[in-house]
Image (spheres, rainbow, N blue to C red):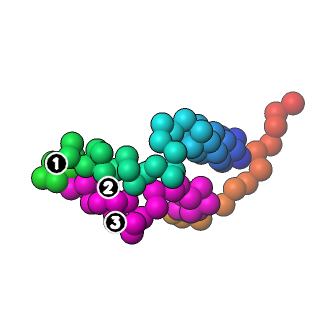
Amino acid sequence: MADHAWNALDNHIYGFTLQVSNSPVDPSEYREAAQSFLPMIPADKYPYLRALSEQLIDGAHNGLQDFTLSLTASNAPSKTVDLQPVPLSA
C-alpha cells in the first residue's frame, strides 16, 4: 500500500512538472491566447471550455495551476483504511 501511495505522489508531481514546464503559452500571455482561440470554441459544443476561456479574457480566472490544491483534492481519502504490517516470509 505504501508503494501505491508513493507512486501516486510521484506520478502527480512528475505530471504537474511536465505540464508546467512544457506549456506552449507563457502565463503572461494566457489572456491573448484565449482571445485568439475563442472563435474556434463553439459554445454549444464546448460550453465549459468556452466559459473558462471567457473567464480568462475577462480576468475572472488567471489560468495558473495550483499544485497544492490539486494534490489535496485528488488525494483526499474517500474512506479510512486500517493498514496492518505484512509479515515477511523467511
Asked if residue 65 lies in the magenta stretch, the reply is: yes
CA gap, disc 2 to disc 3?
9 Å
Which mark is nearer the camera, 3 or 1? 3
Q: Amino acid at mark 1?
A: Pro
Residue found at x 34% / y 66%: 58
* Identity, as a three-letter code, of the amino acid under mark 3: Asp
Residue 1 seen anywhere in this rendered image of the structure: no
Q: Is residue 11 left or right of residue 55?
A: right
Boundaries of the magenta span: 47-75
Q: Residues within 10 Å of mark 2 (few under 14, many from 20)?
A: many
Residue at 37%, 46% in the rendered image: 33
Q: CA distance from mark 1 to mark 2?
A: 11 Å
- Using the image, tell me which numbered label, if any, was put on residue 42: 1
Mark 1 in CB contact with mark 2 (< 8 angstroms): no
Reply above or below: 10 against 89: below
Mark 3 highlights which residue?
Answer: 58
Please provide percent x and percent y for residue 25: 47, 42
Residue at 38% from the left image edge and 50% from the top image edge: 32
Residue 28: % across, % down: 51, 52
> Which quarter of the picture shows residue 80?
bottom right
Give SS at disc 1: loop
Mark 1: few/some/many CA within 10 Å (<14, 14-19, 20+): few
- In the rendered image, residue 63, in percent from the top left (x then y), is placed at 45, 57
**For marks 1 and 2 on the same chain, the one whose residue lies earlier in the sequence:** 1
N-term-proximal mark, 3 vs 1 = 1
Rendered image: mark on residue 53: 2
